[in-house]
Amino acid sequence: MTLISFRDVSVRKYDTTVLLNINWQVENHQNWAIVGPNGSGKTILLDVIAGKWPVASGKITYNWSESLRETVELVSNDYSFNRIVNAGAEYYQQRFYAYESERAPSVRAILTDQLKPVGTVDEKSVELAPSKVSEESLMAICELLSITHLLDHPFVTLSNGETRRMLLAKSLLKKPKVLLLDNAFSGLDVHSREVLRNALTSLSDHGVTIIMATTATEIPPCITDILELNAGQISKLCLVGEFKTKSESAIYPKPDPEKLAHFGYPAFRDFQNALDLRNITVKYHDQLILNRVNWKIKKGEKWALSGPNGSGKSTLLSIITADNPQRFANNFDLFDQKRGGIGASIWDIKQKIGHVSPELHLYFPRNTTVFKTIASGFFDATGVFFKKLTDEQIERVHEVAELLHVHSLIEKDFSQLSKGQQRMVLLARALVKNPPLLILDEPCQGLDTESIEYFKSVVNAICDTDLRTLIYVSHYPHEIPDCVTHYIKLESGRVASYQ
């Protein structure tokens, strides 16, 4: 039986045709993986299936009697699933503030729709309707996704991977017949990826149809069919067993040496140690996030930081980037200066650091141009700044945009880009001021294989100097650039190993 049928469907996003003449059928007992390069239309195709984006021409037919809203569930990769939670997640630094975790709703409250309006002072003044989610269903889904132990945690304290599992649980509690997933494996550690693969198999066995946008290297066992997109058109429809990924010997593009020559070396280089962390401890109420972490990085060293979801990686980086207020209660040096320098402002510290993270991507303002997004890296603003750019800075924005192959997007709004394109733009933002310390926290989330390989080659090239220091975070060993020579692993807030 055909569940969903696309007939000559074309879709426009703003002034651009993003899907063209899509002819496709989803049959009962099929599970589909949608693959393709960045900007090929994977996410917009999921939005169209879910009824969240209109069709410009053609026809979509759904073969069921219930409403689309009751049948199809799209797992969001941000907090837009609930306006109250979204309003409580306005800036990415807040997860590190103790008072924010006090007022933020718990995972249980989110999953059971027991959310008080933002700004509620007297908890007793608001009476909520009983939850429609039974305790039995809640526990079954939480056990399926291994998040039972997180139920009473404030959602802003969750790691990126834990947040993604919470979002999936929220969707599964609606008991959809068709589940749409957009890059569901991004940000998940090895254990969490295995949990997700097993969960999808179980859902499929219970009759749920799964359609997911994913990479060609991250196709779970439950998938039966492949739809490959290229520039908004279907380039291949086949059974999963007939699908072949690119050969490991494929030749990927390399950065232009002439453009790299313009990039140059960091202007600030008057230090011996980029950081020296001594017994770093971070605690929220009774929850110990970091427990006496010691880490010293000399100028020019390239480190990989690893550890499972919730091990404390993002919190440790927030101490370095001055996003965590508990930095004042800890003992560390940045660039040979106590806590970044006596009297130094947050912005003085950030000027020396180029930083990209999943949280920055999650909260970054969408309604600004790519040019302004990249240029905001000079001032560590989030897309909005009030200083006039110098001619040199304007030229620099264009150089970095060309280096990362996003120059053709320079006048577009950030919101018009695919998730992968947005990630490349934020990487350009991190590089634009040519910082002595680069902190790249899961920088390849949402990038296709070719973009990952290209980005690694850029990182290797600009880090080919003992004047630039690198901290690189990834759950995937193949994403770590060759320039990395030192490794540190966290487990449960402690240093598990140095290498």
Image (cartoon, grey):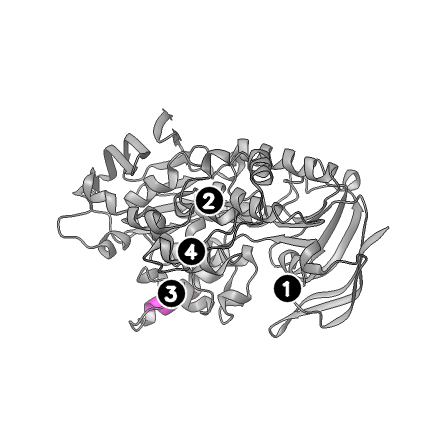
Q: Main secondary structure of the magenta part?
A: helix
Task: State the image quarter where residue 63 is shown.
Answer: bottom right
Query: In this rendering, which labeled residue sits more in front, label 4 or label 2?
Result: 4
The residue located at (36%, 48%) in the rendering is: 95
Q: CA distance from mark 3 to mark 4?
A: 38 Å
Judging from the image, what secondary structure is the residue with disc 4 in? loop
- Nearest to N terminus: mark 4 or mark 2: 2
Judging from the image, what secondary structure is the residue with disc 1 in? loop
Where does the image place residue 437, in percent across and percent down from the top left?
32, 46
Dots 3, 2 in contact, CB < 8 A? no
Where does the image place residue 83, in percent across and percent down from the top left?
48, 61
Which circle marks residue 52 in the picture? 1
Taking the view exactly as shown, the residue that stands out farthest to the left is 342
- Nearest to N terminus: mark 1 or mark 3: 1
Residue 252 visible within the image: no
Which circle marks residue 116 in the picture? 4
- Nearest to N terminus: mark 3 or mark 4: 4
Q: CA distance from mark 3 to mark 2?
A: 36 Å
- Nearest to N terminus: mark 2 or mark 1: 1
Which circle marks residue 375 in the picture? 3
- Residue 298 sits inside the magenta stretch: no
Q: Which residues are magenta?
A: 392-397
